[in-house]
Image (spheres, rainbow, N blue to C red):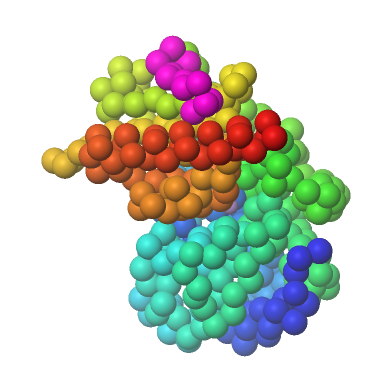
Amino acid sequence: MYLETEKVQELLTYIKKHDTIIIHRHVRPDPDAFGSQLGLKYLIKNAFENKKVLAAGTMSKGLSWMGDMDEIADSDYEDALVIVVDTANYPRIEDKRYNKGAKLVKIDHHPDVDSYGDLEMVYTKASSCSEIIANISLELAEALPLTKEAAFMLYAGIVGDTGRFQYDSTSATTLTTAAELLKQGIDHFIINDRFNTKSMEQAKFQGFVLDQLEITDNGVAHILINQADLKRYGITEEESNVAIGIPGSIMGVNTWALFIEQEGSHPYWRVRVRSKGPAINEIAAKYHGGGHPKASGASVYSKEEMSQLLEDLEQAAQAYLDNISE
Ligand SMILES: [Mn+2]
């Protein structure tokens, strides 16, 4: 188990000391961002009824079933404990007031980009930030016990970040943690079904992605998705996430990138980079992004930069293939 007992105790001391606790997470939140944020909120709220526990940021439409964010006044930050979950670096923290509190804590599972906070709990072995929060609760037992409401959120976060226990970030600890969450009596079928269900428009868009995908001999796949494509299929950029995993299910593909054109006067594409082989987070970092070795995000601002990124993926894939054939 990766948790450090002294740090868990220090976190508990901070929680006890502050009457207001505000929990932040990254922009463009995914299930793990919401799961760890709301899971932690419910855990603290349950153990310390009189504390004001607030979730910062805006809710995303597609995940509104997970819960609500809170209205937070500037004055709430006075003497508050601020906990940032699931976020490796400052620019990705949603709501820039995170540094207005009295104390700052970072809890994350991404490789460190910016070191921040009075207390840092960064465990890259964890499948998800939700898994870390669940284990903090399990370790603190009576002081911060699991509840059904929190377990639902944390389970959803783990399922989200592990692709339903499929990615190689899934460890024995992930599964024993999930088992503890199930013991709370949550409806795990509902969670999986919500992640699994897509609109007809999204299903058709998946067909478009398969149809347009370009794959090189080294197994690097990519697709350009224009705003016009999203409009034609009647889906939002967030809803286009349904296509992210598709290239990886095709035989021979080891690395892939989805370029999504952004609106605005200057050319700009958001890039979702994924891998089943080579580490791609350092390549993503070269292009204004970052993330995990096998799942990262980036941005490119010209077609040249797009070609460079693809060339870098090509080299990484080539090195990976050379290495496994040895
Ligand atoms: Mn995460």
Q: Extreme front residue here?
A: 326
Quarter containing the N terminus: bottom right
Quarter containing the C terminus: top right
Stretch in magenta: 208-220
Q: Residue at x 37, y 40 (%)?
A: 309
Q: Is residue 183 above or below residue 215?
A: below
Q: Is residue 198 left or right of residue 229?
A: right
Q: Is residue 29 left or right of residue 132?
A: left
Q: Is residue 170 visible in this depiction of the protein?
A: yes
Q: Extreme left residue here?
A: 265
- Measured as percent of width and height from the top left, residue 150 is found at 69, 56
User: Residue 303 falls in which quadrant of the image?
Assistant: top left
Q: Is residue 66 above or below residue 90?
A: above
Q: Residue at x 36, y 18 (%)?
A: 233
Q: Is residue 49 left or right of residue 33?
A: right
- Whether 217 is among the magenta residues is yes
- In the foreground, 90 or 189: 90
- In the foreground, 286 or 262: 286
- Measured as percent of width and height from the top left, residue 187 is found at 75, 39
Q: How many marks?
A: 0
Q: Is residue 190 visible in this depiction of the protein?
A: no
- Measured as percent of width and height from the top left, residue 105 is found at 56, 75
